Image (tube, grey):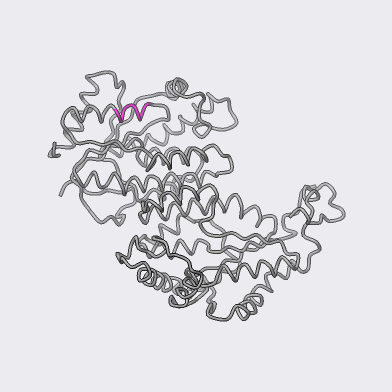
Amino acid sequence: MGRPVRTVAPQWPYVDTYYPGLYVGVDGLDGSGRTTLANELHRQLQSHGYPSVVTGPFPSKKSQTQNTLNKHDRRVGDTSRHLLYASFLAIVMHEVILPHLRAGYIVISDRSWISLYARATAQGLDKNWVTTSLGFALQPDLVIEPAATPLTAARRKLAGAEALDPLESVGGRSQLSGFIAFQEQIQILLAPLRQQLPWHVVEDIKNLDQMARIIHRIEAESEGLPS
Amino acid sequence: MTMDHNAFRGHLIVAEGTDGSGKSTAMSLLDSWLTAQGIPVYRTAWNSSSFIKPIMRHVKKKEWLSPAAFSLLHASDFYDRYHRLILPRLEAGYVVLADRWVYTAWVRDTVRGLDLPWVQSLYQGVREPDLAIYFSAPPDVAISRIKHAARELKYYESGQDISGLHDRWASFLWFQEKMRQAYLALADQGILQLFDATLSITDQQKVLRQWLRPILESYWQQSDFFQAPADDTTSSITSIKKGDF
């Protein structure tokens, strides 16, 4: 037994109905520090003796490279791009996430379906259509969100990248105000999900007490996991 | 003065059917026939987006595609071609000959175990064809055509991802028969027009050209497609000459 497989669309035809592992989604604003948080969680869980793995949005380095080549080609439409990302998540789900959950791992997803949904909807695609397209995706047992305002997220982005990403911005504005407007839209889209799913916001990953509380919550959620 | 988009109404002709049913050959011949008459034609094939192709090739080679991933990646390919290549031409009045349309996804993805309403929802709002033809050929005919073309079957094409059969040809036969039944159900519902793909190529063309005649009448009544009307000197289309194509 274990946890029931819950997908975005009810009763998606998976072979298994239960898994013994724990699925943790790390979601939030672009630039909020999702990858940093996912890696830090992984490190600390391992140091506590839990089997854990971090998964990203791409099934391989090669697919990431090929995607990067197309990413900013304005000829690629939002619908096609969203479906491409959704197919990547479906591959990662099938090839990495589910096998590890079946084997009893804590799987930390650096972006679950929630980030894909928020981005595609903020880009103007129909919310219901986007949700339906992600019907195959596993619902996280716990969502961890790095706290950020749109402005702090922009500051983080600018510290690590040459420029802000036009795909994470509302067009027709200055780079910064476009990015902030887009992230505000994402905040609005995430708000109802925070009420519906087990959700934990991390204010500061450098704060050891805070991280200890998150690990404790994951430990509580993953009670009975093989260590 | 703006261009009159209704002067030429684009038409979408779709060929559906299992691999080896002769769709591509028939479409190629129709293309030549229409082009020879000055009718503007654009051909598009399933799974041919230049942006998606390298990714598709990579993940197929790795055999990473679950039914959902397979479905979503092909939908991504479709929408890239639909928005970028197909819709602008339909709006400009071209005849678009599509070697497979959304029905391929309906059939293949449901044979792979996905729910039809989910697959259909991925393609909601996509334009319905003016004519959607199902090239009906028994799997053994399709197999002999593929063998004649000395072509190797591929993993997903033969349905080995779901059949559990080690022998590729046996899997292909099983998979194509499943798809044939799903196509025939669409033909029974009147969504696809049943076409006997076992006819000789010459006889096929006779039938298909007859079917296309009513759709093409508007083109035969028009003057040169690429020539602007005499009083429409400011239209952007005046800069396009037939020889440019």
- Indicate the quadrant where residue B4 lies: bottom right
- Indicate the quadrant where residue B156 lies: bottom left
**Residue occupying image coordinates x 27% and y 48%:** A6
In the shown orientation, is residue A156 left or right of residue A69?
Answer: left
Give the total of numbered labels: 0
In the shown orientation, is residue B235 left or right of residue A168?
Answer: right
B238 shown above or below A196: below
Measured as percent of width and height from the top left, residue A172 is found at 60, 31
Magenta segment includes A38: yes
Range of residues picked out in magenta: A33-39
A93 shown above or below B29: above
Q: Quadrant of the C terminus of chain B?
A: bottom right
Magenta segment includes A226: no
Most foreground residue, B194 or A105: A105
View extreme (right): residue: B230
B15 shown above or below A42: below
**Residue occupying image coordinates x 39% and y 48%:** A134
Measured as percent of width and height from the top left, residue B230 is found at 87, 55
